Image: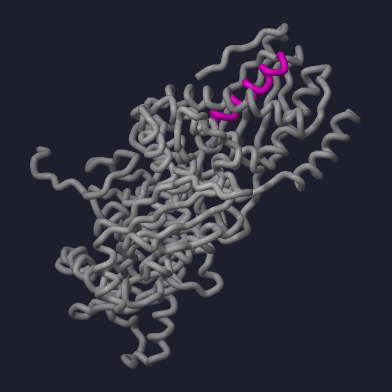
Amino acid sequence: MSNDNIIYPSVHSFSNLSLSDSSRTGFGYNPYKGPSSNAITPETSNILINKKTVSLTPTSFDSIYDRNILKKVPEISLSSFSFLFCEIVNWTRNNSKGIQDLEQRLNTLGYQIGQRFLELVKTRERIKYSKREIKILEILQFIHGAFWKSIFGKTANELEKSQDIENEYMIIDDIPLVSKFISVPKDYGNLSCSAFTAGIIEGALDSACFPATVTAHSVPKEGLPLRTVFLIKFDESLYTRENLRFN
Amino acid sequence: MSKTTRYSGDEMWKNNVEKIQNSELFTLTYGSVVSQLCRDFNNNYQEVNQQLDRMGYNIGMRLIEEFLAKTGAQRCQTFKETAEMISKVGFKIFLNIQPTVTNWTQDGKTFSLVLNENPLADFVELPMGPDNRICRDLWYSQVLCGVLRGALQMVQLDVDVWFVKDVLRGDDQTELRLRLNKFLKDEVPAGED
Amino acid sequence: MSSYYFVIIGTRDNPIYELEFSSFRSGVSGIQVPGKSQFSPSVKEILPFISHSALDIIEDAQWSTNSFNLGKIDSFYGLMINAFISQGNIKYVLCYDANGSGTNGSSSPSLNKNDENSIKQFFTEANELYVKCLLNPFYSVNNAITSPDFDHRMKLLARKYL
């Protein structure tokens, strides 16, 4: 069959399926084929109705889908995370060409985490009734409060709106977790390893349809040498939407 | 054995004193790193394993200092004691898990650590593909091997650490194997970058 | 025998997972394979288009209400469309035909409410499954969900609630 007329699906996956793959077990969606790839057949129907256990992937018997994400999260020592993070900064530094590049890479690492945490925290919240955030102020308050608390164990310290510039907001953390054990040498100037946390915020905001760029700046105050300000700059299009919908 | 039981009691207490936080941040950060590495090396999983090992080695070299500072442990007299110390105290303090020590060889130089749970690999499912290369080549928690190797190197033990089984690959348990090669005499090992 | 078409749509309006099935709750004979969707081929063809056109309505509803479950948002010649949206802008759409099962014609309001409730629970648990899938570092947002485990669990959910 020629490959000329095949319309490829708009999604892709790590596992590189193709049109000719069909599932051995009858389970498993194949985006190249669409719903016919995972339609219910007599065998699968039998499995489902009789609730038989099947081994579909190497980890089927201890599947990730069995874990309960709603229960309380286990704890781990802070030093483990710090060691891991220090090594990440080290590895990223070796791979990057300058301060900007380093911050960008840390931001990318945090971005994926932010996307995941957003969905996770919201899903957990729903046991006690919660709502979807649809306004800028709402989502910022969510991030400043429940989101920050879930990740770092405490809420962020302040949430401010910039006086001079129109669409800028700031979240301030007095003692950011990630930079606690890192000291930046002088030749790195104003590098902030909180670029990682900035990435987390950016991932969460982008995911929730509030496109923004987030940067981290170190603004020490007396007694708080690690105080970090996260500058959140929203896109113009957001303001159009807010004005149309809510004003 | 009294030495280790004293530490076991201590480390339960120490576990309360440790600053503790959300383990999901840790898990997701590590996952982010592994997937980034897979993309950087273009799915060459051998390279990914090596890089994870190197990172673990650097971590281990620093981690041992904190371990010694926190526990005030004395030098272990035998490799068996080292094994007990690693499994009962080390893993407990840093990862809040307790692996079991099994499968000693006759000469007492090699043993296995069996992890009943692995916080690094929570929520990980290796992607299934037609060739399943990832299942064959990638040891997801390879960083642990590096950490153990680096940490023990700093206490003058030259060991080899490698994974034997991993539940992510479908085996029944996650098993690491450590082999003592030799005792080092005051050499300063070069850091690996 | 009501048939269902369930699709999870990512942030770029692309389907990342699809499933066709029919209600498992039946004592009605004559169905050879319980659970297999009974859509006719003409209907099957237009299902993706129907869900896609529902996206406009979903986007509108998305910014008007704070809730996750959007309920019944549209209907198309006897096909009802329910939707659910998550904080991360992932949309879950369920199209089903309104044929009741072989009960007496009267579709009492309470029956409808039960259906709404079970659809809502179905969506909630589907969202949980999605979040678990998302936590996998090898899965990125907007990738297709090809995991057979996920498929299996989703079908079990379908059996449980619909």
Left or right for B97, reference C148: right
Where residue A1 appears, x then y in whole percent?
Answer: 12, 39
Asked which quadrant contains residue C98, the reply is bottom left
What count of labels does the image hold?
0
Where residue B193 appears, x then y in whole percent?
Answer: 50, 19
- The residue positioned farthest toward the right in the image shown: B2
Q: Residue at x 69, y 46 (%)?
A: B19
Q: Residue at x 63, y 23 (%)?
A: B61
- Asked whether residue C133 is in view, the answer is no
Would you place residue B80 above or below residue C40 in this image? above
Magenta stretch, main secondary structure, is helix
Left or right for B126, reference B77: left
Would you place residue B157 above or below residue C101 in this image? above
Left or right for B152, reference A69: right
Residue A68 painted magenta: no
Where residue B130 appears, x then y in whole percent?
Answer: 33, 35
Where residue C134 appears, x then y in whole percent?
Answer: 43, 51
Quarter of the picture containing the C terminus of chain A is bottom left
Please report the bounds of the magenta region as a residue range.
B141-156
Between C44 and B60, the one lying in front of the other is B60
Residue B145 painted magenta: yes
Q: Residue at x 44, y 60 (%)?
A: A48
